[in-house]
Image: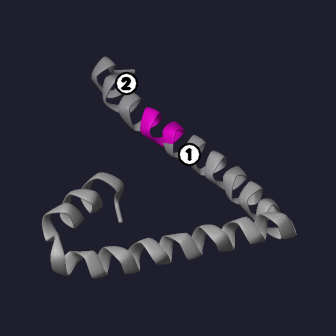
């Protein structure tokens, strides 16, 4: 085989293996999350987290009127 052909395909093989590994890990993670969400105690925890996130959003929206610079920095740093 031509060496040039082999060098060009190494990158494709690495990308393919990386994508395949990512898909396998993601599938396992999805199954694990589904198992966690079925547990009643975990459901309560997830609901609490969702409520806290909503509360933070409401407070940030109200604070945006008085201190927009702080809200901009907060959202940039924490991703809200």
Q: CA distance from mark 1 to mark 2?
A: 24 Å
State the image coordinates of residue 9 (x, y, percent, origin top left).
Answer: 38, 32
Residue drawn at point x = 62 percent, y = 52 percent = 26
State the image coordinates of residue 65 (x, y, percent, origin top left).
Answer: 18, 81
Compared across the picture, whether 64 is left or right of 57 comes to: left
Q: Which mark is residue 45?
A: none
Residue drawn at point x = 68 percent, y = 68 percent = 46
The one of 73 and 29 positioned closer to us in this rendering? 73
Compared across the picture, whether 11 is left or right of 49 comes to: left
Q: Earlier in the sequence, mark 1 or mark 2?
A: 2
Circle 1 SS class? helix
Q: In the rendered image, which quarter is residue 34 located in?
A: bottom right
Between label 1 and label 2, give the one nearer the viewer. Answer: 1
Q: Identify residue for label 2.
A: 6
The one of 28 and 7 positioned closer to us in this rendering? 28
Q: Is residue 17 magenta?
A: yes
Circle 2 SS class? helix
| The magenta segment | 13-18
Q: Is residue 66 above or below residue 16?
A: below
**Magenta residues, dominant SS class:** helix
Image quarter of the C terminus: bottom left
Q: Is residue 59 magenta?
A: no
Q: Identify residue for label 1.
A: 22
């Amino acid at each position: 085989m031509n060496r040039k052909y082999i060098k060009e395909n190494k990158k494709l093989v690495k990308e393919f293996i990386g994508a395949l590994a990512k898909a396998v890990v993601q599938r396992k993670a999805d199954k694990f999350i589904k198992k966690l969400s079925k547990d009643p105690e975990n459901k309560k925890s997830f609901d609490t987290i969702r409520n806290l996130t909503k509360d933070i959003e409401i407070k940030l929206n109200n604070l945006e009127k008085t201190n927009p610079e702080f809200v901009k920095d907060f959202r940039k740093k924490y991703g809200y």
